[in-house]
Image: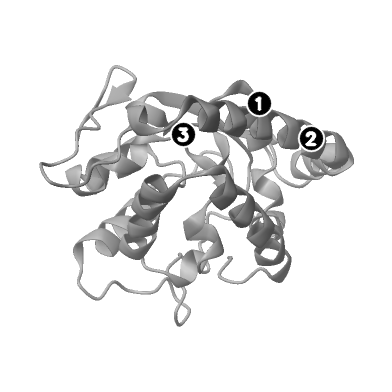
Amino acid sequence: MKVQAGSIATTSPAGAGTTTAGAVSMGYRAGKRALDLVVASICLLLASPILIATWVIVRATTPGQALFRQRRVGRNGRTFVLYKFRTMHNGCADDIHRDYVCKLLSEDQPPTGGQSDIYKLQADPRITRIGRFLRKSSIDELPQLFNVIRGDMSLVGPRPALPWEAELFGLAYARRFLVAPGLTGLWQVSGRNCLTMRQGLELDIEYVERRSLALDLKILLKTIPAVVSGAGAL
């Protein structure tokens, strides 16, 4: 799988499954889009004081922009610009993260990130002090509500992957790109960083095969206690 000209190939290997983007009813697509627009708009309105306060705090505590923009891979392999609050020091390289993700995907017994049973880099020197809180509370992801309203993302779907991550996934996990990435998903409510990356990717595929409005609503409801508890978050 190679990212080229704003898109990636999403062809599944032969026999890999029968679920395709075209197999989903128009009713489900319309209902899911309506749910995205209504819920994301309400959440933006309710969270506006938090968004403003976070923007001010990030700008006041570390040099650089408060909003972080990064290209991610969306539905059918098309790339888009994802918005998050910046949680790292400005201008940091991503070598540490790339090396760790490669190990997570290539090793039979992938290493934890410094804490037992947590598959996420711990004590990452790139992360700011306020950034740790924003990540733990998931406040850093609130700007992605704008991505949901724009149609780049959905409320529920696979985790939005970086282009170089998508290349590492290969054809084995290509079906996860048949749907729009989500603000939350089956992976996030089933253990988050307590799962290995390959376990999480398998859950992404399971979501694609089982997707329905009922499943989306169930995941959204499970997201609330998952965020509040901070289980598996760093």
Residue holding disc 3: 180
Q: Earlier in the sequence, mark 2 or mark 1?
A: 2
Residue placed at 64% from the left, 56% from the top?
A: 135
Which label number is shown at residue 149? 1
- Disc 3 to disc 1, C-alpha distance: 12 Å
Q: Which amino acid is tagged 1?
A: Ile
Which label number is shown at residue 44? 2
The image position of residue 35, as x and y in percent, is 67, 34
Residue placed at 42% from the left, 44% from the top?
A: 93
* Quarter of the rendering containing residue 161: top left
- Label 2–label 1 contact, CB within 8 A: yes
The image position of residue 115, as x and y in percent, is 48, 79
Q: Depth check: 68 or 202 in front? A: 202
Q: Quadrant of the C terminus?
A: bottom right
Mark 1 Cα-neighbour bin, 10 Å: few <14, some 14–19, many ≥20: many
Q: Secondary structure at mark 3?
A: loop
**Residue 213 located left or right of residue 101:** right
Q: Depth check: 94 or 215 in front? A: 215
Q: Which amino acid is tagged 3?
A: Ala
The image position of residue 172, as x and y in percent, is 20, 49
